[in-house]
């Protein structure tokens, strides 16, 4: 099976812009989670989608949003970008039943100037 | 915060030696997982240990879990230069929301 894919891999934006990141899970996986990784804060959970519904949410401002499509592909959107949003954004998928291994994509590295 | 914490933050060893990393967490969990991350890339799943298990092996990896102490350890035996990476533990207490520790950066010197 193909692994989790994320596009784009690299992105440069300026403050105030918005960005959309995409994640395609492993075939058959219905859950997609998003994480932000920065050197200072480590890996932080953003949100999890299951069957097109947000099932869990981390402690991030409303500028961070996401959605999931019927084919389980997920997008994450960040509006009004700030310098502090520069990070590696990782998505992970699993079957969705809970208590399972997550499989991570290679990440999208976002730089906000 | 439910976030786990790894200890030590950084570890440097010679090739062939064993490496031990520890993870502590704060609340009851369903399972605990260990992941490896090579510089700036995605995380690779190493091993999952359930809350009712005490020890698990996978190749050169040995993981222990002590739920009474809320801690886990990852042992990599006979380390290789290719083991150089950051290692994270992840805990789930809701079943679908995972919390990652801060990571241990392992350097294996050839």
Image: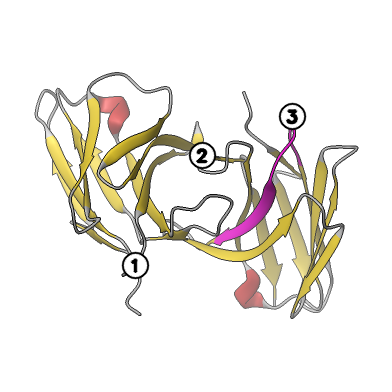
Left or right? Give the position of A92 relative to A84: right
Of all residues, the one furthest to the left in this rendering is A17
Q: Give the residue drawn at x 23%, y 58%.
A: A9
**CA gap, disc 3 and disc 2:** 15 Å
Q: Residue at x 69, y 50 (%)?
A: B32
Q: Which residue is mark 2?
A: B97
Does the magenta run of residues contain A26? no
Residue B13: mark:
none
Mark 1 belongs to chain: A
What residue would you read off at disc 3?
B26
Q: Disc 2: which chain?
A: B
In the depicted structure, whether residue B59 falls above or below residue B97: below
Magenta span of residues:
B24-36
**Eyeballing the image, is A54 above or below A90?**
above
Label 3: chain letter: B
Instruction: Tell if the residue under mark 1 belongs to the same chain as the one under mark 2.
Output: no
Q: Nearer the viewer, mark 1 or mark 2?
A: 1
- Residue B8, percent across and down? 76, 45
Q: Secondary structure at mark 3?
A: loop
Q: Is residue A95 above or below residue A39?
A: below
Asked if residue B31 is positioned above or below residue B53 in the image, the reply reads above
């Amino acid at each position: 099976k193909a692994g989790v894919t994320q596009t784009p891999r690299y992105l440069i934006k300026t403050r105030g812009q918005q960005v959309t990141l995409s994640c395609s899970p492993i075939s058959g996986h219905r859950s997609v989670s998003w994480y932000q990784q920065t050197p200072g804060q480590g890996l932080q959970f953003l949100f999890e989608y299951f069957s097109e519904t947000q099932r869990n949410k981390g402690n991030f401002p409303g500028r961070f949003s996401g959605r999931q499509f019927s084919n389980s592909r997920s997008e994450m959107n960040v509006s009004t970008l700030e310098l502090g949003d520069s990070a590696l954004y990782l998505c992970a998928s699993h079957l969705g039943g809970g208590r399972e291994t997550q499989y991570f994509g290679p990440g999208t590295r976002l730089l906000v100037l | 915060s439910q976030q786990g914490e790894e200890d030590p933050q950084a570890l440097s060893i010679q090739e062939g030696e064993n490496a031990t990393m520890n993870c502590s967490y704060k609340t009851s969990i369903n399972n605990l997982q260990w992941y490896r991350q090579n510089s700036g890339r995605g995380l690779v799943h190493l091993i999952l240990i359930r809350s009712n298990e005490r020890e698990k092996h996978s190749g050169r990896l040995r993981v222990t879990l002590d739920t009474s102490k809320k801690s886990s350890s990852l042992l990599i035996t006979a380390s290789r230069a290719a083991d150089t990476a950051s290692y994270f533990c992840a805990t789930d207490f809701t079943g679908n929301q995972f919390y990652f520790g801060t990571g241990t950066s392992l350097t294996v010197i050839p």
